[in-house]
Image (cartoon, helix red, strand yellow):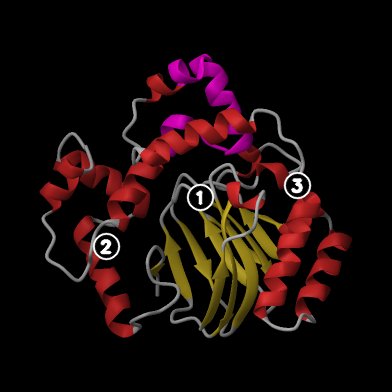
Amino acid sequence: MEYVSRVPRPPLDGLIDDLYYLEGAPPYARFMLPPAPAALLIVNLGAPFRIRAGRETAEYVDGCVVTVPTRAWEFGYPPRTRSVGVHAKPWGLAPFLPMPAAELCDRPVTVEQVWGRAAVAELRDRLATADGPHEMLTLLEEELVRRLCETAGLGLVRHTSSVISATGGTVPVGDLSVAAGVSNTHLAQQFKALIGVTPKRLARSQRFASTMLAIDPAEPIDWGDVAAGAGYFDQAHFGHEFREFTGLTPTRYIEVRRRFLREHPGSALDGWSLPAD
């Protein structure tokens, strides 16, 4: 698969980790994505894809918007895929949404539902006729800059979320509101509106993601050491958290990761997503 990625220019770099272009035949038809402390926007330019969130499965033609999830979700690729999108920081999509992020939590919506059918059709036409991936990313970046708007409470949520990220999700949530000079209730309300989840939930996702991304699946793993290093009460607590986030045991997770590495070394999709086939 061809994967092209770059960091956007200011002011988008404070909202988005990267803009990306993806095209080709995916290594597997279905992927499971554990909940990550991040948001996602995809503008689809190929055949429709499918997303299963919980018990519901939906087809997406124009693309989708996914705010910070609280549970694993499944992504189904067509035989060949082509899209552009953004990997956003937890608060990164708030300035582009016409509704509170909480309304989208664990309920991916189409890009049309967010920006309107005519606007999305026009954007997809421009992207489809662009001269290569780099021009496509520039067009998407320009569209995002044009849609960028002031968002009340963004500074508070951005700063507090950055503290959560910097500590790997281990900061006591009560300390966040004290440091920010607001009540726990107010902070939670702002997080729900702009991120879709509470500070406590974001911290759990951040700790889990930081722990998993630090694991080298090619090396032997002592799960007790992993749990202790991540600040979990004990290995049993870590195992419970692991199953809640992925539906897998830690041992099964590593088996699947190693299968991916063995069958498709160097794949652009390896790292967080897991084959569900």
**Comparing labels 2 and 1, the label whose residue is closer to the camera:** 1
Q: Badge 1: few (under 14), some or many (20 or more) residues near its Cα, within 10 Å?
A: many
Left or right of 229 on screen, residue 34: right
User: Residues under labels 3 and 2: Cα distance?
Assistant: 38 Å
Read off the residue under disc 1: 38
Q: Which mark is residue 83?
A: none
Q: Nearer the viewer, residue 55 or 50?
A: 50
User: Residues under labels 1 and 3: Cα distance?
Assistant: 18 Å
User: Residues under labels 2 and 1: Cα distance?
Assistant: 21 Å
Read off the residue under disc 2: 253
Q: Is there a contact, CB below 8 Å, between mark 1 and mark 3? A: no
Please state the horizontal and vertical placement of residue 163, each as a whole percent of the image. 43, 34
Left or right of 275 on screen, residue 53: right
**Comparing labels 1 and 3, the label whose residue is closer to the camera:** 3
Secondary structure category for the residue under label 3:
loop
Secondary structure category for the residue under label 1:
loop
Mark 1 or mark 3: whose residue is earlier in sequence: 1
Residue 142 found in image quarter? bottom right
Does the magenta portion include 199? yes
Read off the residue under disc 3: 148
Q: Amino acid at mark 3?
A: Leu
